[in-house]
Image: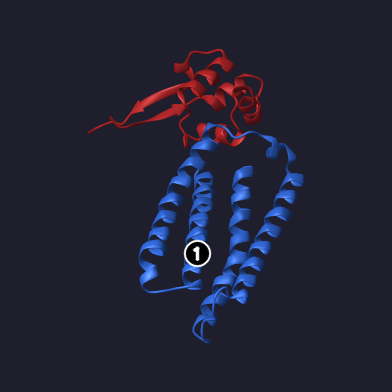
């Protein structure tokens, strides 16, 4: 398996482990109690914890991959690697733009506070998931 | 015009002392996985990479890659 596919899998796992529980918890608790006034330190703390968990998984995972396959890690990307990355970024860009239009143009009329912030975070996470997924699929198909 | 590109990289590697995909890739600046994808016909290399591959085996480009037009009934 190419090194860049391994790191893409690692990013997907890190996002699933970190942001899966974050959005599940946020969704479950959203309707159960009234929204706290901004800055809502409880939600901010939860987001900070999620970001730290993601960084830890990525850090440990990259160190592990680097130690297991040091030669692969040092191999510079070639023209195909760059083409795959470019394709993945293009797909993710459209997802991110759609999410930002929703967050910036439509949500201010119907939502406020952390609902908008969480929508923006979700757009970024989904765009990143799309980017890493396109990388994985491209390497799987040897395209 | 539809068609596909076939190649003889596997055969040429065999005739050049069982050169590995990694070694070929190293000599032309591509990764082993990219060579594998080219050999399998899943990825078409750039013209420059194609010439580099031919140069490694000291053969003309046409002996490495071949264009096969799709037969229309």
**Crowd around label 1: few <14 · some 14–19 · many ≥20 (10 Å):** some
Quadrant of the drawing holding the N terminus of chain A: top right
Q: Residue at x 60, y 26 (%)?
A: B29
Judge left or right: residue A103 versus residue A56: left
Q: Which residue is mark 1?
A: A122
| Residue A38: percent from left, percent from top | 55, 75
Residue at the far left: name it: B73
Judge left or right: residue B16 versus residue A108: right
Residue A143, visible in the rendered structure: no
Vertical relation: B40 (above or below) A88:
above
Q: Colour of chain A?
A: blue
Residue at the far right: name it: A67
Badge 1 element = helix
Vertical relation: A85 (above or below) A26:
above
Vertical relation: B34 (above or below) B64:
below
Question: Number of marks in the image?
Answer: 1
Residue at the far front: name it: A38
Residue A115, visible in the rendered structure: yes
- Depth check: give the residue in front, A55 or A20: A55
| Residue A4: percent from left, percent from top | 61, 44
- Depth check: give the residue in front, A90 or A77: A90
| Residue A30: percent from left, percent from top | 51, 80
| Chain depicted in red | B
Q: Residue at x 39, y 69 (%)?
A: A108
Q: Quadrant of residue A71?
A: top right
Q: Residue at x 38, y 25 (%)?
A: B67
- Depth check: give the residue in front, A50 or B17: A50
């Amino acid at each position: 398996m190419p090194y860049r596919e391994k790191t893409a899998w690692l990013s997907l796992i890190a996002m699933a482990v970190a942001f899966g529980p974050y959005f599940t918890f946020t969704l479950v608790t959203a309707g159960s109690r009234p929204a706290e006034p901004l800055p809502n330190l409880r939600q901010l703390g939860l987001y900070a914890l999620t970001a730290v968990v993601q960084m830890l998984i990525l850090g440990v995972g990259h160190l592990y991959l680097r130690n297991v396959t040091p030669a692969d890690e040092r191999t510079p990307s070639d023209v195909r690697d760059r083409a795959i990355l470019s394709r993945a970024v293009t797909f993710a860009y459209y997802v991110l733009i759609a999410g930002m239009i929703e967050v910036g143009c439509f949500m201010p009329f119907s939502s406020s506070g952390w609902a908008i912030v969480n929508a923006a975070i979700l757009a970024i996470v989904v765009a990143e998931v799309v980017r890493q997924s396109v990388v994985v699929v491209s390497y799987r198909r040897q395209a | 015009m539809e068609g596909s590109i076939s190649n003889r990289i596997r055969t040429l590697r065999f005739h050049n002392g069982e050169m590995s995909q990694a070694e070929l890739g190293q000599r032309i600046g591509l990764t082993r996985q990219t060579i594998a994808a080219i050999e399998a016909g899943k990825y078409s290399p750039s013209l420059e990479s194609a010439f580099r591959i031919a140069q490694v085996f000291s053969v003309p480009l046409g002996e490495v890659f071949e264009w096969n037009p799709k037969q229309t009934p």
